[in-house]
Image (cartoon, rainbow, N blue to C red):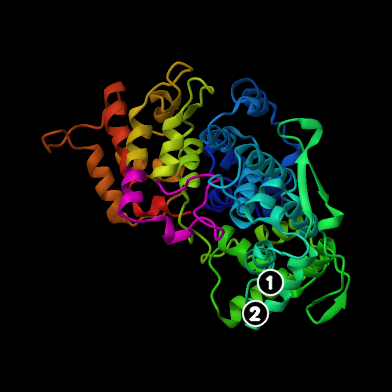
Amino acid sequence: MAQLTYDQAAHLSRRMGFGAPPEELDTLTRMTRQAAVDYYLNYESVNNDNLDNYLQKNFNPKRFTPMDDVQLWWIIRMGKTARPFEEKMTLFWHNHFVSALDKVPYETMYVQNQMLRAQALLRFDDILLNVARDPAMLVYLDGITNVLGNPNENFARELQELFTMGIYDAVTGEANYTEKDVKEIARAFTGWKFKEKGGKKYKYVSYIETDKHDAGPKEIYGRIANYTGEDVIAIISERRATARFLVKKLFNFFVYPLADTPEDKATIEKFANVYFTGNHSIRELARAIFNSDEFFSPRAEFALIKSPAELTVGAMRMLGADYVPGNLHQADYETYVGFKSMGFDLLNPFDVSGFPTNLGWLNTSTMLERYNFAARIISTREVNKMSPGIGLANEKLKTHIASTPEQTVRNFLAVMGALKVDNQVVAILTDYLTKDDEGGRMPFEVDDHFIDKNIRGLVFLIMCLPEFQLN
């Protein structure tokens, strides 16, 4: 099998992570498609001690106080991890199994986030069961108030509508469940509770309070039995509608939005088959998707809008910026505020439907904040523990400068995501590098002043291009 091209490597790094610097892309171009996918997919074998040690020392969750501490903790993970696909999958599951800090204590949201990260690539049945037992979910969807004689239907409804099948089948369009199914499934989950394990913060144990659990017969999907919540999860995980729904969600997040066409329905069926032949393994489903011709097709390339996380972390990683998050006492809250201003109140989506996708990220306000972030990253030269944040050193920029202004422009377009722009845009950017403050021509002489002014300006202009907003 042929090795990846530079553009294919950049595409893979943006989707399975947040983008990568040129040296990492060069490594990927020496790999086959399968080897490159495994490079990201098999992240458990990658040592992440540097990140873990940093967080333990500077952002120990036992010292979290306001909810923005746990939000910044996750931003740091994304920015400094050696396992980008681990964080990307955690983002996917967080926006799939939605819970939010506006209702849920930050301690349980932290525990949920860790659980989603640890189980991101397991069998879907196992992930779903652990989500159903999760303290944050039990609070967010009122599972702790779901008791015998007074069932709460919130989790039963969202379990089917948003977490597993959707209201209608993604291929056939048929209804996947009825209101009676919602009511009967709610009965199956009555009595599910949690408590602190040994009275310790961040340690929880889930259990079923037997005298509040409805153990009677229930009719679900036309069959009658004394179903438990575990039974329901096993049944739903085996339904073809669930496989189709998951494939569509994964494609919309990682590949391209699927339409209601025969061709796209065939794509859903193709990967739904992988779900079943792989025993519901998310790892195997992800492996098949990222190795597919669909993923590496022209349709997939730059087919998505970058989320604020992909925009921010991607810029840091691709440009090789220095990221010093600081600590709980002197932290980089500008990055946290930037996420929020761009519409990404991390761990705190507006409602159970989750965060927006694609064009939903963009409006006049959030675009201005994207430009503000671009201005901030090119304006900050150095960062340290006394003034934490994101800094971009001249020496890092210097490595991408070529002998001509046009090639310099093309180098930076390649560094910043292998962006595809037309020749007119290249000409405009090249023209910018060869004009002085009065609009006259100047020689292309690279010195510290030129780097500090013109090259930084070039990076800013590229970050403001429509093409840079695409993933």
Residue 171's label in the rendered image is: 2
Q: Kindly identify the residue that appears in the image at 52 percent across and 38 percent down.
A: 22
Give the quadrant of residue 82: top right
Residue 147's label in the rendered image is: none
Q: x%, y% of residue 54?
A: 62, 23
Q: x%, y% of residue 320?
A: 49, 32
Label 1 belongs to which residue?
A: 244
The answer to which of marks 1 and 2 sits earlier in the sequence is: 2
Please say whether residue 360 is one of the residues in the magenta stretch: yes
Q: Amino acid at mark 2?
A: Val
Q: Kindly identify the residue that appears in the image at 44 percent across and 55 percent down.
A: 470
Q: Is residue 82 above or below residue 213?
A: above
Q: x%, y% of residue 342?
A: 40, 47
Range of residues picked out in magenta: 342-371
Of residues 56 and 33, the one nearer the viewer is 56
Q: Are marks 1 and 2 in contact (CB under 8 Å)?
A: yes
Give the quadrant of residue 407: top left
Q: Is residue 197 above or below residue 232?
A: above
Give the quadrant of residue 30: top right
Q: Amino acid at mark 1?
A: Arg
What secondary structure do most residues of the magenta stretch adopt?
Answer: loop
Label 1 element class? helix
Q: Is residue 235 above or below residue 328?
A: below
Q: x%, y% of residue 36?
A: 67, 48
Of residues 464 and 332, the one nearer the viewer is 332
Label 2 element class? loop
Of residues 158 and 218, the one nearer the viewer is 218
Q: Kindly identify the residue that appears in the image at 84 percent across and 80 percent down.
A: 223
Circle 1: is it few (<14), some (14-19), or many (20+) Cα within 10 Å?
many
Q: State the separation of the CA atoms marked 1 and 2.
A: 7 Å
The quadrant of the image that shows the N terminus is bottom right
Please say whether residue 51 is one of the residues in the magenta stretch: no
